[in-house]
Amino acid sequence: MTRITEPDLVLPSLYIIQKQPGITTGELIGELRAIFNPVGEDAEILQGRSDDKFSQIVRNLVSHHTLDQRLGYTSLGESGRTNSTHRLSKKGIVYLQENLSSLESLLSNNLGYIATVEGIAEINHSHATGKKITIFDENIFISEGRKKTVTAQVYERSKLLRDKAIDFYTKDGTIVCEACGFDFYKTYGDIGRGYIEIHHQKPVYQYNETDFSRLVTEALKDLIPLCANCHRMVHRKKDNPLSIQELRKILANQISQ
């Protein structure tokens, strides 16, 4: 079953077009592919075509005039017989800015195709219902300054969630990597006390009316403390992040050799 739909591509398309005004449809497909890294059915080549299902949905987004005529978010120009160029309208700029922080937080987490599509759907739902949503960002504290749009609310809530996760996993004053057992305090002394990175196994988001304490209780099941090395290895392949179980198996195999 195809997982991604035209509505899922609207906001990421605006994000790309803002960065590259005048981008062609072919270029847009490439940039969206780099963001989503489609897998499964969406990555299957269509019979008798050079397109897979993912790129065909992007082409449909343009040919159905969803971005320009239906939503009014872009203006469409012509680069050639079969390739349109895209620029944001004022309405598109406003819509993007309203959702930019949530989108960048989601994309920063690099959780793979299915989780990213599901996260985009949540952002769309929040906008359609008028409910404010915060998507927590696991990378704010390890790559600060890399993203251009991090609101104070995202920063503070992400920090609080991280602190809660560290408290939860700290036993007898020690917190270790759940994959390899690395202990920053044991290795580096006081400078490493209480330090760890927190990995989100799936997007963590909060609607403003959701009680934070209840959110934390639910989210802790999907938050894992990892050392920097293991965290990077989990996200080594953007299209297919490793589960903690898979990473542990890799480590065990390496040790046994």
Image (spheres, rainbow, N blue to C red):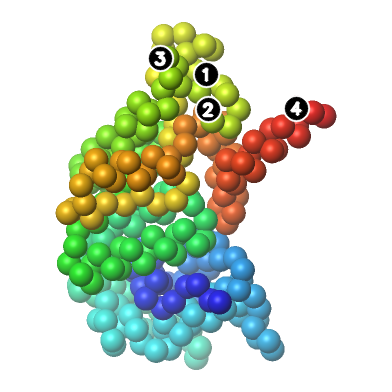
Q: What numbered label is drawn on residue 177?
A: 2
Closest to the camera, between mark 3 and mark 1, is 3
Q: How far apart are the alpha carbons under marks 3 and 1?
A: 11 Å
Q: Earlier in the sequence, mark 3 or mark 1?
A: 3
Q: Earlier in the sequence, mark 3 or mark 4?
A: 3
* Res 31 seen here: no
Q: How far apart are the alpha carbons under marks 2 and 1?
A: 7 Å
Label 3: which secondary element? loop
At horizontal 57% and vertical 73% (from top left) the residue drawn is 42
Classify the position of the C terminus by image quarter.
top right
Label 1: which secondary element? loop
Q: Earlier in the sequence, mark 4 or mark 2?
A: 2
Compared across the picture, whether 36 is left or right of 193 comes to right
Pointer 4: what residue? 255
Please rate how many residues cluster around mark 4, counting C-alpha atoms within 10 Å: few if below 14, some from 14 to 19, many from 20. few
Q: How far apart are the alpha carbons under marks 3 and 4?
A: 28 Å
* Quarter of the image where one finds residue 23: bottom left
Whole-percent x, y for residue 43 in the image:
61, 71
Query: The residue under label 2 is which amino acid type?
Result: Cys
Compared across the picture, whether 223 is left or right of 53 comes to left
Pointer 3: what residue? 173
* Quarter of the image where one finds residue 195: top left
Q: Residue furthest right?
A: 257
Q: Nearer the viewer, residue 142 or 111?
A: 111
Q: What numbered label is drawn on residue 183?
A: 1
Query: The residue under label 4 is which amino acid type?
Result: Ile
Query: The residue under label 1 is which amino acid type?
Result: Asp
Q: Are marks 3 and 1 in contact (CB under 8 Å)?
A: no
Please rate how many residues cluster around mark 2, counting C-alpha atoms within 10 Å: few if below 14, some from 14 to 19, many from 20. many
